[in-house]
Image (cartoon, rainbow, N blue to C red):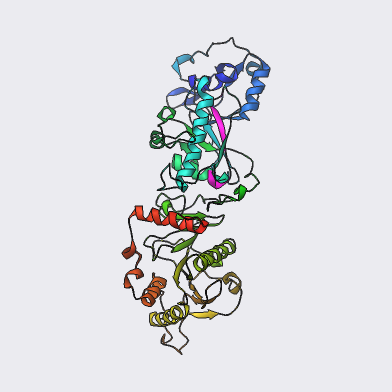
Amino acid sequence: MDAIMDAFRPFGCVGVRFPKPKMNMGHYGQQASPPSYAFLDFTTHEEASQCLADLKGEAIVRNVMLTLKWSSSPGGANRRMPPNTMQPPFNGGIPPPPPPRRNRLTEAEAADSTTLFLRLPTTDASTFPADLETVRLFAQTTMEDELNIGVPMDSPDRVTAADEPALRVTLRHPNEQTNYGFLEFASHAAALTTMVSLTGFDDGGVVSDDKLAVGVAAEGDSTKKPISHLQGVTLYWAKGSSQPKGDNNANGKNHGLSFNKQHFPPDSRTDCWFCLASPSCEKHLIVAVREECYVAMPKGAVNDFHALIVPVEHGGDGALVNKKVAPEMDDVKSQLRMHAKTVLQKDLFVFERCIQTKGGYHTHIQCIPVEADSGPALQSKMLEMAIRCGFQLKEITSDLGLNALEDDWSGGYFYAEIPLPGGGNEFRRFIYRAGDVGDGNNNCGGRKGTVPLQFGREVLAEVMGNPDIAQWKACVVSQQKEEEMTIAFRNSLKGKTE
């Protein structure tokens, strides 16, 4: 009862009353059945009406969601209690029942929301505005940290909310006497990134004490200070307007980040390296984020500009046959190809091995800059090695995308784009559909082949005469080096010089 009274006292509540418990016959005689509701008393109708309006019919007390509505009981709505009086305990010492429980809004149910509900653990109304602002800044800094892994707070390379509108968080505080508020984000994905980082769950909960211990730096300051006095602060999804319209890259600034329409699926595998919501995802390798996919450096990169294009949503279906993802993937490929030609003076070797593996598969495309005019050598070696492995790569002569060539690619495939001499956006396309057999006119001998897990890298290793690059584990560098490479790659894509 005290917890409920403390929660509603700032709204003018002067008393909490529970109805008499119902008596039911049990194994041990009559037993009290505690009620699942209570009455809140106010001194005036106006105060009660304002409370209902401010809370929009819902409130969270000790992590339990309560539903508020007008009482229709003469003994409830019309009865007034004097200030500072409390309902006495029930006869027989039966404690007040817990408030009615209901499921909170889940991330899946809030898929279009850009709003998080925030409740402070404190009851001192004089600190509510300052504490809520601290949590707002804490949430905003959390997104900056997620994007700038490995980048010092005082580094000029650090992307902040001042530069990137997609990182900005605003606070809505309905009443200065309440210990709750609402955090508004630029997109659902931005809100989800913050939720997972701070609570560890898609659906929210109590903010991690470890996160609070790290603290937050005031705007313009590079030193973080602990905010452990806010232990117990909670974040949950709130019903809110869909993501705001507008250009998240205002003023022409684009730092490789776009949270628009992004959504980390609630069923993402928690052990998948490529799922952004997964704790095993190494976010310091992320170079840029788009709406449906993101660009990252792989573990054990072949060179400093080896890129992976990864769909945000977890799935084993091929990236290039997914009608939702493929257009954006093609656009990113063109950008990387142009970057290779104009900035690196190289061509781009592109391939996708979309074949399920024992531990599951999150589809992705590999894009590796190679020496200019090395396309013919790559093509010759790739076709030769495919035959040796027992499968045949066929050239695609149509201009149609893979999703238009076939309806069913569920068996998997290996796809490659070989750059034509002269570089640029001209290339030849080859495909092998898993399960096909040789045609009898080559060394496949009419048998089914298997595409090696590292086939694309093995082809490149043969052409470059460097067997080490065939296996990613042979190319792994320290995390510090990975962070340096990722920052350099990001700056190069933005056309920024060191």
Quick check: can you spot residue 244?
yes
Q: Nearer the viewer, residue 481 or 143?
A: 481
Q: Is residue 352 left or right of residue 334?
A: left
- Residue 450: x and y in percent read 40, 75
Q: Is residue 194 left or right of residue 406?
A: left
- Residue 158: x and y in percent read 46, 46
Residue span colored magenta: 178-190
At 60% from the left and 51% from the top, the residue drawn is 252
Q: Quadrant of the rendered structure where residue 305 is?
A: bottom left
Q: Is 186 covered by the magenta stretch?
A: yes
Q: Quadrant of the C terminus?
A: bottom left
Report how many numbered discs are placed on residues in the image: 0
At 65% from the left and 22% from the top, the residue drawn is 50
Q: Nearer the viewer, residue 298 or 122?
A: 298
Farthest residue, direction top: 82
Farthest residue, direction front: 498
Quick check: can you spot residue 108?
no
- Residue 346: x and y in percent read 47, 70
Q: Nearer the viewer, residue 52 or 10?
A: 10
Q: Is residue 162 above or below residue 299?
A: above
Q: Quadrant of the rendered structure where residue 297 is?
A: bottom left
Q: Nearer the viewer, residue 88 or 452?
A: 452
At 49% from the left and 38% from the top, the residue drawn is 139
- Residue 432: x and y in percent read 48, 76
Q: Is residue 448 above or below residue 189?
A: below
Q: Is residue 49 above or below residue 303?
A: above
